[in-house]
Amino acid sequence: MHIRKANEDDLEAIVRIQGKTTQAAQWTRADYASLIANSQGLILIVELDSTRPSTLAGFAAFHRVMDEAELRNMTVDPAHQGQGVGRQLLAEGRRRLLELGVKRIFLEVRASNIPAQRLYYSEGFSLHSRRRDYYSDPREDALVMSLAIF
């Protein structure tokens, strides 16, 4: 596995992976392009080195504001879930954000997305608050989680 910053050439693959996962926030190509162009944005992708051409296995999209960051969206291709891709994305995001002076990472996760919650809790995130009816299609609460990094 190889993790790198996403670029414009990765946008179609990012949107394709996102579309395979109903739990993921459904962003447009333009949303990702805007985050790539934003100096406060960071999108990391995982490529599988074992395939030619390399296969995009997942991505994590972060946005920084001063010394805080938000994990805006993270998706692992269903074919590669359970293989540590999400954990590696979180670890690399944490490392890069810490280098940029970030002290805390926030995220929202669907209340029903138990596998993602397990991952976040195992990586040290804790429950911060609950946002009622935050998600639509289907309507659902969001759990706001946070992680202090140092």
Image (cartoon, rainbow, N blue to C red):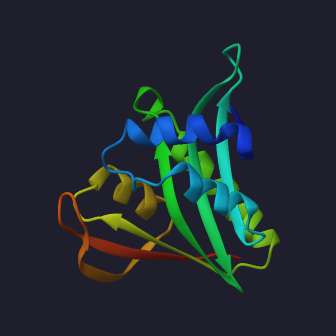
Q: Would you say 39 lies left or right of 54 here?
A: right
Q: In this view, which residue lies farthest toward the right?
A: 99
Q: Residue at x 69, y 66 (%)?
A: 41
Q: Would you say 51 lies left or right of 114 here?
A: right
Between residue 84 and residue 141, name the one nearer to us: 141
Between residue 53 and residue 150, name the one nearer to us: 53
Q: Residue at x 36, y 41 (%)?
A: 21
Residue 31 visible here: yes
The image quadrant of residue 111 is bottom left
Q: How far across and down, in percent of the image, does residue 81 sit?
A: 43, 35
Quarter of the picture holding the N terminus = top right
Q: How far across and down, in percent of the image, does residue 47 sit?
A: 67, 32
Q: In this view, which residue lies farthest toward the front?
A: 30
Image position of 135 with respect to 27: above or below: below
Q: Would you say 148 lies left or right of 97 here?
A: left
Quarter of the picture holding the C terminus = bottom right
Q: How far across and down, in percent of the image, does residue 126 sit?
A: 42, 75
